[in-house]
Every structure is written in structure tokens, then in C-alpha cells.
Image: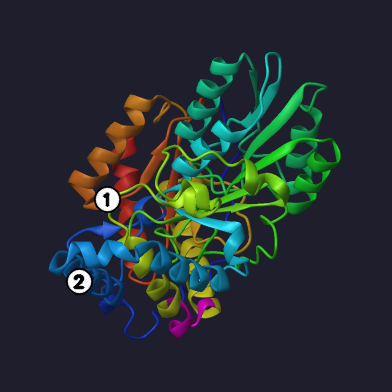
Amino acid sequence: MTLPPVTSPAPTPPPAPLPGTQALFTLDPSVAHLNHGSYGAVPMPVQRAQARLRAEQEQDPDAFFADLPDRIARARARIAASLGAEPDRIALLTNVTEGVAVVLDSLPLADGDEILVTDHGYGVVNDAVRRRAAECGARVRTVRLSLHTPDAEAVQAQVLAAVGERTRVAVLDLVTSPTAREIAARPLLAELAARGVITVVDAAHAPGMLPVQLGAGAGGADFWIGNLHKWAFAPRATAVLAVGGAWRRRIRPLTVSWEHDRGFPGRVEWRGTCDYTPWLAAPTGFALLEQLGADRVRAHNEALADHGARLLADHAGLRPLAAMPGLAMRALRLPPGTAESEHAAKALMVVVARRLHTRIAVRPWPGGGVLRISAQLYNRPQEYLELATGLKELIAR
């Protein structure tokens, strides 16, 4: 397979660092952390807020847990305000993977029904769909999207073309994890709803990186799930499940708890003696983002990600994939024969970490794997240049 030659726009200078922001993080300075999109990085003010909560919990566990559901509700209200949501229409969870499991377990699926996913979806989310389908006799239809499909309209057309008479559910990414592209745009969600398809949006990368206004529903979907510990500066593991329409009465938690009879969202949130301090500290992350200037942070990160992708194209010969506006991530195609299997992709990440002291994300793809970089306030242009020059040598070997 021969890829078209790489062409890059005229070079533009990288964004200037935002003053004082690098000191917000406690990351190892000997490592270039270019994979914020996987695990995030918790700023020091948020770390301190969570540490205080943990200390309070250990001083008197009985007192701490006694009014914890109410404290979670207050934290949820503050988080909802940051997402433009109604507090009683969202629930806190640990991550998107858990949220998808809760939703799938709550949907009425029957033998012969069909669930739609794409081959750009997050691996374990698609695995969860396959497991749920096997349990109820449903089928999974995977829409295969070209890595180089030109625009959102083309993606929408391909997804809608796959909808059949028995399609009941579509599980789609707002921003895909391996390829950093938009799938679940609002026009597509509206078209699916018009066809009677239940929509579940994996918005793992949306909170903090993109402006989010959920309103009284779920962002145009039936279910919308986003992580807060990636781009919204929350501690791990914190996520939000937004539920639209009458679905709130039908949500089944994975664990029955003492809060079950209180209904949604408490029945989904409470699971006994777990560590809820990440959720209670999450509003501090949103407050920090607003203090720094959310629009300013997003503009900086998008420009830096764009600069890093251009360096990888110019110096390592990688082919950038189309990027959704506003993203602080970029995906690039590796040469044919590179990282085409799960084993090879993981091996490349290991060798880049060991030899280049750099963290990246690589996903296997036929015809050449996909490398994803992220950009956050603590990153610097030189890190992407060093990755690009070092990666060129590694690939040549």
C-alpha cells in the first residue's frame, strides 16, 4: 500500500507557554508526557483538595460517609453548571467504560436487534457492545470508516447508510480515541433519532477540551458520557453520565445500593464504601480551568497539538489525519508495516518510552498504525521536535 506524499501547510510559530502553568503539575520532568488524552494529569491545587478530603475521611469515617450522598449531590450541581446541564439529569461515575456498561444493561434489546458501532470506536467499549449483544441475541454492525474520509458529512452518510430496519442502538464517539476525529455530530444524532435509533455518545474527551452545553438533555443524544479526569483537571476516576428524556427512570445501576430507591442519579452513583474523593474534588478542576481562562487554554492546546503534528509530518514523514476543530490531540498515520498489530503497537510505545523518554499513544491499523499525540499546558514545542527526529530513526531501523 502506497500512501500519498505528505504535504504540510506553511509553518507557523508554536504558541507561547501560558505563564506559570507548567508549575501546576508534578510530572517527571525527565519524560515528555505527550499522552495527556489517555490518563490526564491532575494539577496540584486539585491534588491538594483531594488530599484534604481523604484526610477528613480518615479522621472520622462514620461522619464522612453519613452525609456523603448529599455532598456528592452538591458536587454534582457544581459540575453540572460547568457543563451547562441540569443536575438531576447527570450522574457521576468512574469512567466512560463504566457508563457505557450501565447504559447497555438498561436498554431493552431483543433477539435480532442490531447495535451500530464504528471501527474507530474505543476498543473495550466495542467489546462491551459485543458482549451485551451476545447476551440478548442482538447483532453488532461495525461501520468501517476510512482513516482519510474527508469530512463530517461523509462520515454521517456512511453511518446512516448502515442503519437497517432492526437497528435499535448506535454507540458512537464524539471524538474518537485512536484517531481524534468527530463522529457523533449533532446533525447525525438528529438523523438517527428521526429513524428511531437510540443514541449513546462516548464523549470521553469532550469535558474540558471542548465547550460543552448539555442543556436539559444529553447533548442531542439519549445518553452522553464524558470523562472529567482527562481535560477537565479532575482526579481519576471521574466521569459524567447525562441521560435524556424518560430514560432516567429506566437506568439500572450495576450495583444495587442503599440509595437505589431514591432513583436517578443517586442509584447510579452510590456503591457503598468506595473512594468518592475524586468526585468531591472535581469542581476544583473546573474552577482552575475557568481561573486560567478555558478559551485561552483550549486555544493554546489546539495550536500546540497542530504544531506538534506538523513537526511529525515534516521530520518523521508521518501523514496527519483530518483533525476536528478545537481538539488538543492529533493523529498521524505511521508508514506501512509499522504498528499494524496490537503487539507491534505496544512494542513501539515501549521503545519510544525507553529510548526517547516520551509517552505517546499508538493504535494498530491495517496498512500502518496510528500515532496520537496530545497537547497540554505542561508541554513544550521541543518535546514534539525531539519525538519527531527520534521516531524517524526508530522507524528507519
- Residue lying at the far left in this picture: please name it: 59
Residue beneath disc 1? 273
Q: Position of residue 349 (x, y in %)?
A: 30, 40
Q: Would residue 220 be found to the left or right of residue 313 on screen? A: right
Q: Residue at x 65, y 33 (%)?
A: 146
Tell me which segment is drawn in magenta: 289-294
The part of the image, by quadrant, that contains residue 219 is bottom right
Mark 1 surroundings: few (<14), some (14-19) or many (≥20) residues within 10 A: few
Element carrying mark 2: helix
Instruction: Reply above or below: 109 against 27.
Output: above
Please report whichever mark, 2 or 1, sits nearer to the chain's N-terminal start.
2
Q: Would residue 243 be found to the left or right of residue 190 on screen? A: left
Element carrying mark 1: loop
Q: Is residue 153 visible?
A: yes
Q: Residue at x 28, y 32 (%)?
A: 347
> The disc labelled 2 sits on which kind of residue?
Glu
Residue 56's disc number: 2
Q: Would residue 113 be found to the left or right of residue 300 on screen? A: right
> The disc labelled 1 sits on which kind of residue?
Thr
Q: Is residue 28 visible?
A: no
Instruction: Reply above or below: 311 against 341.
Output: below
Q: Nearer the viewer, residue 61 or 136?
A: 61
